[in-house]
Image: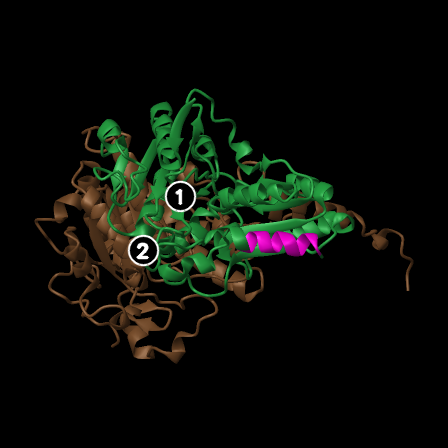
Chain colours: A green, B brown
Amino acid sequence: MTTLTLAGAINAGLRRALENDPKVLLMGEDIGALGGVFRVTDGLHKDFGGERVVDTPLAEAGIVGTAIGLAMRGYRPVCEIQFDGFIFPAFDQITTQLAKMHYRSQGRINLPVVIRVPYGGGIGAIEHHSESPEALFAHTPGLRVVSPATPADGFAMIQQAIASPDPVLFFEPKGRYWDKGEVDLDAAAGAPEGLGVARIARAGTDLTIVAYGPTVATALKVAEAAAAEGTSIEVVDLRSLSPLDTATLAESVRRTGHCVVVHEAPVFFGAGAEIAARITEACFFHLEAPVLRVGGFHVPYPVSKLEHDYLPGLDRVLDAVDRALSY
Amino acid sequence: MSQSTSPDDVDLIQLLTPTGQRVDRPDYSPRIAHLDATALRGMYRDMLLTRRFDTEATALQRQGELGLWAQSLGQEAAQVGSGRAASPQDMIFPAYREHGVAFVRGLELTKILRQFRGIDHGGWDPKDHNFHLYTLVIGSHTLHATGYAMGMQRDGVVGTGDPQRDAATMVYFGDGATSQGDTNEALVFAAVNNAPVVFFCQNNQWAISEPTSRQSRVPLYRRGQGFGIPSLRVDGNDVLACYAVTSEALERARSGGGPTFIEAFTYRMGAHTTSDDPTRYRSAAEEQYWRDRDPIDRLLALMKAEDAVDDAWLAELDEEATAFGEHIRTTVRSFERPSSDFMFRNVYAGPHAIVDDERAWFEAYQRTFVDVSATAGGH
């Protein structure tokens, strides 16, 4: 076991993928000599060269569009979008081209493209640097949408995403880039199908908190605090929004009878709405309270001095836990 | 006249005048010197059968057999000339009215009609003829062609000097697409990577109802120059000139010389699609001006002047076109609606719980309907 940050673990996973498959390419802005603005690609340009770790022109549609062409030619491009709020120039290429090519070609064209997106808030950034647009992509058939919460998952999941025959939106919780954890660098990454499987991050009996990416750590803190008051909380780390591991979710909620979904994105039309609907359909007679959601408000991401009021922190999640349990 | 620039532009590369006289150019004439009478007849046949296909498809749409049709009428020389300059190992990225290029690549053209009949979003395997699926979103595929060309560079099939090995991509788009961000980004990526891609812009003067003057205040080929890409304008109704400039551009790309931007100055003689009505925005005089520059008539005039064709051959071709038309009509009418589960297939390459569950649910739902037609009595 090695102690790594999430950023370091993803870096190690990218390095492993570059070593194992000569068709893997990294593409993005400032990912070469600089190593990316978050240093996730640190050292890779030096070791693998500019043909495989490509500093691209400053054009997101161009990055994704040329990655599609490279994938048609047999490559496995891994694109870095520098920040969540800068993905929209590439939105058309992702949703109308990347997501549909396998379908419209009747399976004749595979596009194994990974799009890495540092996302989420809590880092005191200026406008457009703290957003959570994952639901927009989960709503698009043809894409897989995942987010690791721990260094161990960062290392394994980036390799699974690169091995996937489908396009994968890989959302990296940038606020957790420097969180450390144990990573087994000798472990095999596992089959790409494993990407869609949720993880019980903490077992419990009274209530299930459903989280992914940056809110998993928050949920674990909530569970710790609640345990001190005698409440046993189970935390499910979804890992994937598309596909969604409804079976693991439903199994947990049937046992606990209570569910709170937590994400940073606005609650309105967010991933939590879909999760709540599915849990309600699957667990109606086991539920002792409505499924509650905690997340961002229906406002643009606010100024950073207010982001801790906007983000679903410990207190707001505990409040939802109390409301669910006292319903 | 609506075109923003005159086709008599001094920069226009032409090897065949509208009345079928050869123009001698030391830079480009050598590139067509090997085209003998047989080759000219081949080009004529490609253009004539492409037009027959287009005419049949238009009629089939009017009869309700197709949901929509995008005509290639008038653009046969630009498509056949450029398409014939490509090698089998080159990868072609069409927009959606490159029926002439498809024909030259060897695609069974009725496969194109599957998409317009609403039974397929694609219709063929791009690998069969190195001819990608049609792309309907304007300009998107310019980036795919550029990325594919960057892959060719990495595969070591550019600049080896082996004509059987060296390859390039060629992407077709229109005057409207030159305004798209994707097209401009493709030109940037192609330029800085020196990628082996030929940007073949068919300026057919109209983006549905908008003339080229709504897209640009400079001739379109000059846009390519701004990216540091060799760019030129060719008479798009001159099949010989289109062949010559494209063969030069592809040769440059395959040999490692990088991208080229070609503006083929042509005319969309038909409507944008069968849903369009050009009488609302352009004049009959303009249409007549271009009918007088018909690309097919032009080549026929040359072949007759040079005794490259006789009446017997033309009659034979006419019979072939008639049989081809019959084949198109019969084939399209035989295309059947796919079964419902077609909708769920190939959304993902691997398993996906949501799609898999919805497919299983829908199949079970459909099984709940009893086929009453088998048991119902008469009225």
Query: Residue B150 location in percent, x, y?
Result: 27, 39
Q: How far, Cα to Cα, is label 1 from label 2?
A: 18 Å
Q: Is residue B308 visible?
A: no
Q: Image point 33% across, 79% down: which residue?
A: B283
Query: Residue A242 location in percent, x, y?
Result: 55, 45
Q: Which is nearer the eye, A119 or B164?
A: A119
Query: Residue A56 location in percent, x, y?
Result: 25, 44
Disc nearest the viewer among 1 and 2: 1
Query: Residue A101 location in percent, x, y?
Result: 46, 46
Residue type highlighted by circle 1? Ile
Q: Image point 18% across, 36% down: which residue?
A: B255
Instruction: Give the label on residue A115, or none.
Output: 1
**Is A318 a magenta residue?**
yes
Q: Report whether B69 appears left or right of B258.
A: right
| Residue extent of the magenta highlight | A316-326
Q: Which is nearer the eye, A157 or A310?
A: A310
Quadrant in the rendering for residue A28? top left
Q: Is residue A46 above or below residue A273?
A: above
Secondary structure that dominates the magenta span: helix
Within 10 Å of disc 1 (Cα), the crowding (few <14, some 14-19, many 20+) is: many
Q: Which is nearer the eye, B218 or B119?
A: B218
